[in-house]
Image (cartoon, helix red, strand yellow):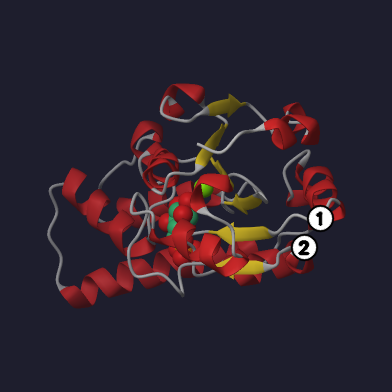
Amino acid sequence: EEKGFIFDLDGVIVDTAKFHFLAWKKAAAEFNFELTHQQNEQLKGVSRVDSLKKILNWANAEVSQEKFDELAANKNADYLTYVDKMTAADILPGIKEILAEIKKEGYPIALGSASKNAPKILQKVGIMDLFDVIVDGNSVTKAKPNPEVFLIAAEKINVAPNNCIVFEDAEAGIEAANTAGMISIGLGNEQNLKEADYNFSSFTEITFNFLKTLQPK
Ligand code: G6P
Ligand code: MG
């Protein structure tokens, strides 16, 4: 049975989570709401529209559809000013090495991200060609924690879900991977990722040998 590897983007491959936070903070300030760090944790892995809905809910704020669309568009424009400055230096430590090793051993690599900006970011940091398949916010209808994004990725790389290994930094993403029946690896804040099968603080702590020994769920 062949393995397949599925990577989330934001917060796993690149540290864009901090840019999303800055941009959402600014958007929320427009309706006088101060977004906290802990609330932001709950936005990780969540689509743009669903994120804004959550923030408005926390703020007890209601806006017209027109205003909603404007807030989402402004947030994205603001976010893209950070993205435009990204280079290969923004790739998180250890990622390139692990991607290269997986590739060298001939295993398929997929991206499973909720972001509509995923292709742009991969291009900016120069690692687009390492991915066999890209499933992003442009091709899914159901946002994480729904497993759709990962199940589509597994199908496209032709690997059974229980042989797929998912790397995630978001609670919603770990839940999606688990629901899909995949092996889930949490990166970063272990407190928020208790449901993950394995936890690591960074890719520099993950060896390819460890990944190779993982057994199907
Ligand atoms: C990722 C991030 C979320 C973001 C979502 C949509 O899942 O973790 O913070 O809201 O993508 O990103 P987008 O770039 O399409 O606004
Ligand atoms: Mg993420």
Residue under the image location 44 percent in, 21 percent down: 191
- Residue 181 quadrant: top left
Q: Residues within 10 Å of mark 1 (few under 14, many from 20)?
A: some
Front position in the image: 169 or 15: 169
The kind of residue tagged 2 is: Leu
Q: Quadrant of residue 120?
A: bottom right
Q: Where 40 falls versus 159 (above or below)?
A: above
Kind of residue at badge 1? Lys
Q: Residue at x 54, y 51 (%)?
A: 19
Q: Is residue 18 visible?
A: no
Image coords of residue 216 (percent x, y): 56, 38
> What secondary structure is found at the residue carrying circle 1?
helix
Residue 24 lies, with reference to residue 202, above or below; the image says below
The residue lying toward the viewer, choosing from 143 and 161, is: 161
What residue do we see at 50% from left, 23% from top? 190
Separation of marks 2 and 1 at Cα, in angstroms: 7 Å
Residue 150 in the figure: left or right of residue 84: left
Q: Could you tell me if the residues under marks 2 and 1 are in contact, i.e. CB atoms within 8 Å?
A: yes
Q: Which residue is mark 1?
A: 103
Left or right, 93 with reference to 62: right
Left or right: 165 in relation to 92: left
Judging by the rendered image, the residue that carries numbered circle 2 is: 130
Residue 200, image x and y in percent?
Answer: 62, 26
Front of the two marks 2 and 1 = 1
Q: Does residue 126 show up?
A: yes
* Residue farthest to the bottom, as pictured: 66
Q: Earlier in the sequence, mark 2 or mark 1?
A: 1
